[in-house]
Image (tube, grey):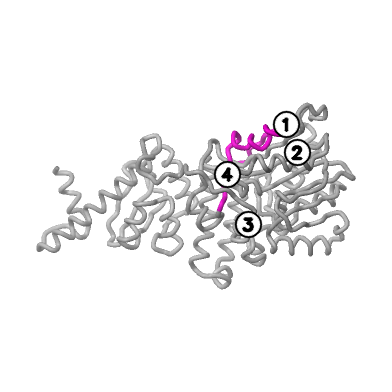
Amino acid sequence: MKREKAELLDGPAGGGGGEGESVNSKVLGLERRVLRRMLTALGEPPLTVVLWDGQQIAPSDGAPVARVHIRDRAMLYRLVSNPDVEFGEGYSTGRIEVEGDLAECLEQVYRALRRGRRGGIKSWLPDRMAQPRRNTLSRARDNIHHHYDIGNDFYRLWLDGQMVYTCAYFPNPEMSLEEAQTAKLDHVSRKLRLQPGERVVEAGCGWGALALHMARHYGVRVTAYNISREQLAYARERARAEGLEDRVEFVEGDYREISGQYDAFVSVGMLEHVGPACYEQLGAVIDRCLTPDGRGLIHTIGRDRPGMMSPWIEKRIFPGAHPPSLGEMMGIFEPVGLSVTDVENLRLHYALTLEHWLERYRAAEERVRKMFDETFTRTWRLYLAGSIAAFNSGDLQLFQVCFYRTGDPNVPWSRDFLYRV
C-alpha cells in the first residue's frame, strides 16, 4: 500500500495542494500504473517513456536505448488499448515521438515482446491470429495499386538505380546497394540454372529488373506478369531503351492468368500478396505452366511459424499481405507433386538492404513531404525502420525456395554451381 500511495503522488503533479490537485494526482498515478502494466506485458523493453506532463517511467534494469514521448492522454489510452495498431498511428501523426535510433528502439521492443508472450501477453494484446482475408482477383489488384502505384518518382528517391524493391544479396557486407542488388539477380538466375534459349515466366515482376537481367545475361526469353500499372510502364520503357523488347514481354495480368509453357517459373516478392487460401491455386498454375523437366524459385518474406502481418503494416502499407511459414508454403508444392530442393534464409541480408533504403529515404524526406505530406513521410519512415527491426530480431525471415518436379533426375548434386563465377 505504501508503494502504491507513493506512486500516486509521483511526478510534477504530486505533492501538497487542494482537493482538485489531489484528484489530478490520482488520475496521473492511475495512468502511470496502466503504462507500467503495458510495459511489463511487453517484456520490459529498455525504453524510457515520457508522458505529456514530463513524468517518466524508466527501465528497471540497464540503460534505455531510446526515449518514447507520448504527447497527450488520449494517445496513451489508445496505445494501451491496441499497441499493435496505435503505436504506428501515433507515430505517423506526431502524437508519439522517439528520441534515439528508431530501428534500434523497435528491435528491442520486438525482442522484449517475445519474452512478454512467454509471460502471458496473449491474454492482454488483441488477437493477431485471425485468418487472413482471401485475395480474390479484384481485391489483389486493389491491394497492389495501394502500395505500388503511388508513383515511380517516389520509389526512385531511395531504391537502387534498377528499382529493385526486394531483398538484396550481400556476399560482402561492404557492397553498395547497387552491387548487392545485381548480385541478387545473379544469385536467383544461377539457382534457376538458366540455359540460353529457355523460356521463363515471372509472376510479379516489379519494375522489371530480374526479367531484363535474365534475358540480357543468361540468353533466355521471359514473360513477366504484373498488375501494377506504374511498374509495367517503367519496365516496358526500359525494355525498349535497352533493346530487349524481343526477348522480354511484360504482361498486365495476375499470376492466375499465366498461360503457356515454360522451362522455369520464378517469383520474387509476390507470394506475400497471395495468401495461404490461394496457395493451392498458385501451385496448380505452376504445375500447368511448367514443362515436364521444369523447375522454379519463390523468394518471399516469411515467418518461422504461422502468424499475421503487423496489423498496422497491413492497414497502412501492405493491405492483404501475409508472410508465410515454410510449412504454409508447402501448400503450394505438395498437392501438385513438386519437390523442394533447396531453402536459403537471407534474413540478415534483408535487414542490411533496408538499412540502405532507410538511409536514402531519410536523405530524401523533404522531397517526400512535398510529394505527399508529413503523415505519409513519417508512416514510411516507421515502416522501413520497423522492417529493419523485424528482420534483425528474427520476427521476419526471407526465404528463397527452389523446387523441381518430383523425381526429376536433373537436381543439382551440390551447391557448387551457385558460387562459381
Q: Which label is found at residue 323? A: 4
Badge 3 is on which residue? Answer: 138
The residue at 65%/39% (across/down) is 280
Q: Which residues are magenta?
A: 320-347
Quick one: which residue is furthest to the left in this view? 18
In terms of secondary structure, where does tag 4 sit? loop
In 3D space, how far apart are the residues under numbered discs 3 and 4 (Cα atoms)?
20 Å
Task: Please determine whether, in this image, residue 323 is positioned above or below residue 153.
Answer: above
Disc 2, SS: helix
Rounded to the nearest whole Å, what is the CA distance between mark 1 and mark 4? 23 Å
Quadrant of the rendered image containing residue 159: bottom right
The residue tagged with tag 1: helix, strand or loop? loop
Q: Nearer the viewer, mark 1 or mark 3?
A: 3
Residue hosting label 2: 287
Distance in Å between CA atoms under marks 2 and 1: 8 Å
- Work out whether 93 lies above or below 327: below
Amino acid type, label 3:
Ser
Please give the residue where the numbered disc 1 appears in the rendered image: 337
Give the mark nearer the N terminus: 1 vs 4: 4
Residue 247 placement: quadrant: bottom right
Q: Position of residue 311 (x, y in %)?
A: 48, 51
Q: Are marks 4 and 2 in contact (CB under 8 Å)?
A: no
For label 3, count other residues whose C-alpha is less than 10 Å away and answer few (under 14), some (14-19) or many (20+).
Answer: few
Q: Is residue 225 magenta?
A: no
The tag on residue 116 is none
